[in-house]
Amino acid sequence: MTISEKSAYLKGLMDGLNLDTEKAEGKLISAIVDLLGDVTKKVTDIEDTTIAISDELDEIEEDLDAIEDYILDEEDDEDYDDEWDEDDFDDYEDEDDFEDEGFDFGDEETTIYEVKCACGNVIAFDEDTLEEGSIICDECGETLEFSFDDEDEEEE
């Protein structure tokens, strides 16, 4: 029997006894049964709230576990990357083979250049784009061309 059922049972017993609520004993028993009813409602509300909080905490714990697993996996990957040495790559004849396999090496020293377009957009690009000789502004569509004439004159 739940606490709500017990409280209702006591209220029914009191009503069934036909107690005179005008006398001191009847008033006392009636007040006690009313108090038990109020306490029962509060306890039931607290139980419902506790269950809801417990469910939320379980969900938060699952989310934190997922975040922890993700972070630990990244740290494991970084530790694993540090263990590679050049002998591991002897099977590949040139760098293009690495790209086909999906390898991305961020340890290469790549110079990043920036140019400001007439529209005010700042465009970042690498040496490959510089060697191509031009780049298109993604804001206004203007083609920006690069010239190596000054560099050739300095070398002579």
Image: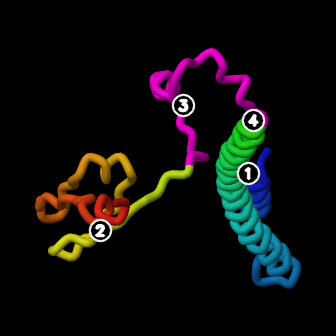
- Looking at the image, residue 70 sits to the left or right of residue 97; the answer is right
Distance Cα–Cα, label 3 vs label 4? 14 Å
- What residue is disc 4 on? 80
Stretch in magenta: 83-108
Secondary structure of the residue carrying numbered label 1 = helix
Determine whether label 3 and label 1 are within 8 Å by CB: no
Residue at 58 percent of width and 18 percent of height:
92
- Say few, some or many: other residues with alpha carbon within 10 Å of mark 2 (under 14 / 14 to 19 / 20 or more): some
- Looking at the image, residue 47 sits to the left or right of residue 133; the answer is right
- What residue is disc 3 on? 103
Q: Say which of marks 1 and 4 sits in front.
A: 4
Q: Say which of marks 2 and 4 sits in front.
A: 2
Badge 1 or badge 4: first in the primary sequence: 1
Badge 3 or badge 4: first in the primary sequence: 4
Badge 2 or badge 4: first in the primary sequence: 4
Estimate the x, y position of residue 144 in percent, counting from the top left: 17, 61
Closer to the camera in the image, 97 or 35: 97
Residue reaching furthest to the top: 91
In the image, is residue 90 part of the stretch drawn in magenta? yes
Mark 4 belongs to which amino acid? Tyr
Quarter of the rendering containing residue 123: bottom left
- What residue is disc 1 on? 5
Estimate the x, y position of residue 31 in percent, counting from the top left: 79, 78
Residue at 57 percent of width and 39 percent of height:
105
Badge 3 or badge 2: first in the primary sequence: 3
